[in-house]
Image (cartoon, rainbow, N blue to C red):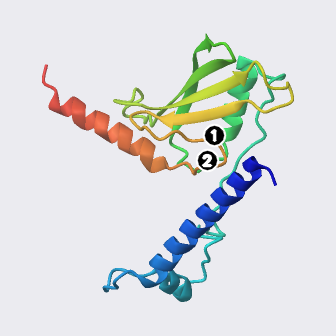
Amino acid sequence: MSAEEAYADQAKKLVDDVIEASIKRLETGIALTEREKTFESIIQQSETSPENTFVRDENFVVENIKWLTIGDYSVAKAEEKMHEYIKTWQYDVSWLYCIDFLGAEEYDFDSRYRFRVRWSIPTRRKPIPRATASVYFSFVVSKIKPKHYPVDTYYVYETHKLVHKPGQSRFREKWLKDIIENKVMMMQMVEF
């Protein structure tokens, strides 16, 4: 056994000992109050295990579409795919939206295309809405990945920091309503 192998074995044993001691401490050494429960008691009360700690709702289905590949990407096709993706969202029929291409940025390893989807609820009394809510889409087209790889697609709601990836988060109509309500409240506070 070489010196490197001996050091590697010793390091692995040390890490295993630390992990084992930590688990034992969690299971036995923590004082219990009504609000504190040990790792072991949580496992006994629920059907979770250390290997599966995430609770998944079987009824939770996020619809997605087949997005463009790097070789197929164009601005017109990206707009078509956004329309197709937005059709999977559940929202009231009174909402209308339009898609605007905001521009492209070139980087060393990719190109980024930005779009704005502007939402509003026009009515007969007010065909021009007082406020709109925007959702910003970004398509990241890699210059180094093979052409058959999908384009990375992300979107973010106006005033929100959370970046969404299609197929991994569910659309909420309430987020659009909140943006519009906040804008209307702000306009009422401003005096001219």
Q: Residue 159: which quarter of the image?
A: top left
Q: Position of residue 93 (x, y in %)?
A: 55, 45
Residue assigned mark 2? 89
Residue lying furthest left: 191
Which quarter of the picture shows residue 128?
top left
Looking at the image, is 144 positioned above or below residue 19?
A: above
Crowdedness near tag 1: few (<14), some (14–19) or many (≥20) residues, C-alpha within 10 Å:
some
With respect to residue 187, does 163 lie above or below? below
Q: Mark 1 points at which residue?
A: 86
Report crowding for label 2: few under 14, some 14 to 19, many 20 or more residues within 10 A (C-alpha).
some
Contact (CB < 8 A) between labels 1 and 2? yes
Looking at the image, which residue is at 61% across and 73% down? 50
**Percent x, y for residue 132?**
41, 31
Image position of 131 (left or right of 139): left
Left or right side of 80 for 101: left
**Amino acid marked by disc 2:** Trp
| Foreground pick, 49 / 178 | 49
